[in-house]
Image (cartoon, rainbow, N blue to C red):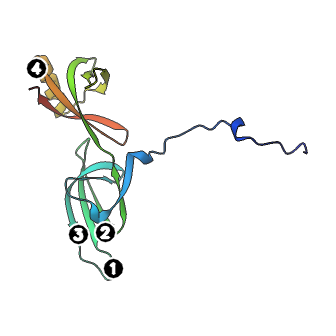
Amino acid sequence: MTEKTRDFNMADEDFATVSSGASETYPQQCSALRKNGFVMLKGHPCKIVDMTTSKTGKHGHAKVHLVGLDIFNQKKYEDLCPSTHNMEVPNVTRKDYQFLDLDSGYLSLLEDNGTTREDLKLLENEIGKEIKTKFENGESFVVTVLKACGEEQVVATKVNN
């Protein structure tokens, strides 16, 4: 073996792993999407509020016009896509937590398994104001947290039964 070559062993190398974000979305044919479902529009996870399909044109593809609201900030996004093409659909999870406390702008929440989490910030929106009011009134309630594309946000509150 010459001085310029050396034995190469994969175990000697250190590779850093980086999440590609591939598990955050999955492909679905545009024609299979439905109103009130979810889709990625312009890089944002959106709930489909309107969907219209045009007739097949002279180039052979029906077009689907999608209108969606961002699930976190309610901003409106639109897109036009051939019905046979794939669109990215976000993996959206919804989970309820028992509200415990509000401390320094962060929510203290109780999970079903008994563990607490204190990493969600109280937002300055309608839901944030509602949580603050219920907390100040000493009410017992549950918050619904929506998670998609690595982002989490409280989207609703409901009174405990």
Q: Amino acid at mark 4?
A: Glu
**Residue of label 1:** 60
Percent position of residue 143, x then y: 19, 29
**Residue of label 3:** 53
Of helix, strand and loop, which one carries label 1? loop
**Residue of label 4:** 139
Quick one: label 1 or label 3, which is nearer the N terminus?
3
Relative height, residue 26 to residue 3 (above, below): below
Percent position of residue 65, x then y: 25, 65
Gap in angstroms between the C-alphas marked 2 and 3 = 8 Å
Quadrant including the C terminus:
top left
Quick one: label 2 or label 1, which is nearer the N terminus?
1
Gap in angstroms between the C-alphas marked 4 and 2 = 48 Å
Residues at circles 4 and 1 in contact by the CB criterion of under 8 Å: no
Quick one: label 4 or label 3, which is nearer the N terminus?
3
- The circle drawn on residue 83 is 2
Q: Residue drawn 11% across and 25% down?
A: 160
